[in-house]
Image (cartoon, grey):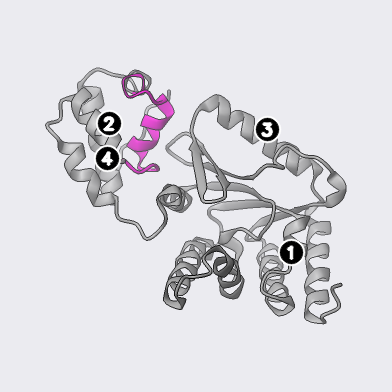
Amino acid sequence: MAAPKDLDPSSSPRALLGAELRHAREKAGLSQTELGQRLFVSGSFIGQLEAGTRRMMPEYARMLDDVLETAGFFMRNCMAVAKSKYEPSFEEVVEAEAQATVIRQYTSLLIPGLLQTPEYARAVDRPWAPMASEESIQEWVEGRMERARLLEHPTKPVLWTVLDEAALHRKIGGPVVMAEALRHVAGLARRNRIIMQVLPFSAGAHPAMQGSLKLMEFADAPPLVYCEGVRTGRMEDDPAAVAQLRFAYDLLVASALSQEKSLALIEALAQDYAHEEYP
């Protein structure tokens, strides 16, 4: 496994913990793979912790203190990075998104969070939590818009998204909201800020029919894949599993419409929604 680059410990608490973990591991004479075996995780997982792309959770901090004999250092300090306004199943994803150089994602039933408008996000969240207060809904919407600010950078991360055609036809929030949402996606594509393709109904069966995929690549750490379901999510770092899911994504791309045809379809549907002509 390639040696990680030096981190700036002052950049973030996660970077500090990662730098200290690397120092303690090397002092103990262990490779990332050897340390991972003692924690029953992969060497890639250790690499992600050292690079600061994965959050150090208390259960791993406790084991690291035992294995590396660090007198409770990781357990004491991991709580500094444990605070998050996102659900536990998703907080690691948000942190990884912010550091990724390339994000490839496929969504089947809705426009992904990084591409949503505020009104679309609100229309998604309300059925998800029908009894939630308006303040809670607004907080969730603001959190999603905060995540989307990473697209304000003109070139990074590279975001390549494949939208299932079903996500374009599901009238979330009504025609006005859908018209705005699709125009927003089309605008990002026209400004060359994202690579966007549509997987048409005519593609038939495909390798991601059972869920959504988000593949993330980093400059200084192994890649990650996030698989999401209803109120659940799983981060995958095993190299074999990541390679298999990357192949599945490549198959989706091969079955999707070209960027030009995808953009034409989205803009046509946006116009239909705007004119309330959609059946």
Looking at the picture, how far across and down is residue 20, in whole percent?
22, 36
Residue under numbered circle 4: 58
Residue 170's disc is 1
Q: In percent of the image, x 37 and y 60: which residue is there?
A: 85
Q: Nearer the viewer, mark 2 or mark 4?
A: 4
Element on which disc 1 rests = loop
Q: Nearer the viewer, mark 2 or mark 1?
A: 1
Element on which disc 2 rests = helix
The amino acid type of the residue labelled 1 equals: Arg
Q: Nearer the viewer, mark 2 or mark 3?
A: 3
Task: Determine the CA span between mark 2 and mark 1.
Answer: 47 Å
Q: Is residue 94 above or below residue 187?
A: above
Q: Quadrant of the N terminus?
A: top left
The amino acid type of the residue labelled 4 equals: Pro
Residue 114's disc is none
Specify which label sits upstream in the sequence, 2 or 1.
2
Q: Answer whether residue 230 is visible to the viewer in this image.
A: yes
Element on which disc 4 rests = helix
